[in-house]
Amino acid sequence: MKSFTVEIVAVGNELLIGKTCDTNSNWLAQQITKLGGRLRRVTQTPDELEEISEVVREALARRPDFLLTVGGLGPTYDDKTLQGVAQALNQPLRLNPEALRMVEEKVRQLAELGVLKRPWLTPEREKMATLPEGAIPLSNPVGTAPGVLIKAGGTTVICLPGVPSEMKAIFNLHVAKLMAERSDLKYAEGSLLVEGIPEPDLSPTIDKAVERFPEVYVKSHPKGEEAASKIELHLSAYARSLEEAEEKIREALQWLEGEALRLGGRVKRL
């Protein structure tokens, strides 16, 4: 069965000081999983050239099929992601004609809407069209900065904006289909809420489920304080068809439900 691996590098000081929660990586993880991929690592790094470059080099050394960077594509002084990627790949930065056309078109549209007071190319706007040599710009239907795709050996590096609406739009328009072509797996999941059984007492049952259903990943999530004995069991599985994956989940959920009831617990499908 075909699948693909992904790493994410989330760029931004705001992530590391706790000002912004990294919802982008969470959303991407969900999409990657649904497409049959396996997200192996998420790394957060500050808006510093050497840090970005080092993190990208380290990720490439692990040879994921896709490396996604998120954030740092804008016009300001601290938007340094493309510089960091170029440095990691030993590629110069060049003004990309197609990316420049995309930026110009977006500037024109915003000027017509009365959003921009200076509807011409500035050095800051040209910065968003300055890409590592050999890169392909990805049109941004929501914002100005294009996404960027560049091959690095067997890894496809894709740079996405940090604004969630722009990141999602570029991913859905350009990236999802590239990933879908790399996998023939379908993903399914399900959850069971178990009450009245402390996690240590439920743990042997979880171990048995893992042995009985080796293709289903079972993860326990205690809810609230331990004394409340409320645990969510989240099950996930891959298969060649959605129906097959869902059947694996159904069988495992049914078995766990019966075992939890036998132990005197209360259960609820989520």
Image (cartoon, grey):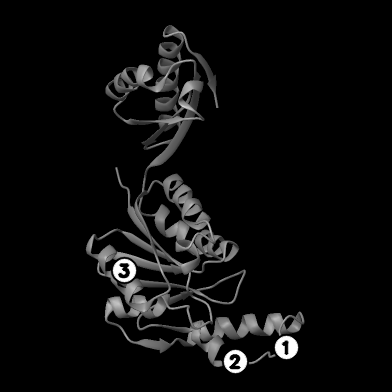
Q: Which residue is drawn at 54% across and 23% down?
A: 269
Residue on which disc 3 sits: 56
Q: Circle 3: is it few (<14), some (14-19), or many (20+) Cα within 10 Å?
A: many
Which residue is outermost to the right? 114
Left or right of residue 122: residue 116: right
Q: For residue 10, which quarter of the picture? A: bottom left
Residue on which disc 2 sits: 121
Whether residue 52 is situated above or below residue 270 in the rendered picture? below
Q: Earlier in the sequence, mark 3 or mark 1?
A: 3
Q: Which mark is residue 36?
A: none
Q: Nearer the viewer, residue 116 or 195?
A: 195
Closer to us: mark 1 or mark 2? 1
Local secondary structure at mark 3: helix
Q: Residue at x 35, y 21 (%)?
A: 200
Local secondary structure at mark 1: loop
Q: Which amino acid does label 3 sit on?
A: Val
Local secondary structure at mark 2: loop
Left or right of residue 53: residue 168: right
Q: What residue type is labelled 1?
A: Lys
Q: Where is residue 18 in the image (x, y as percent from the top left)?
A: 50, 59
Q: Position of residue 213 (x, y in %)?
A: 32, 24
Residue on which disc 1 sits: 117
Cα distance between the residues tagged 1 and 2: 12 Å
Q: Position of residue 182 (x, y in %)?
A: 35, 53
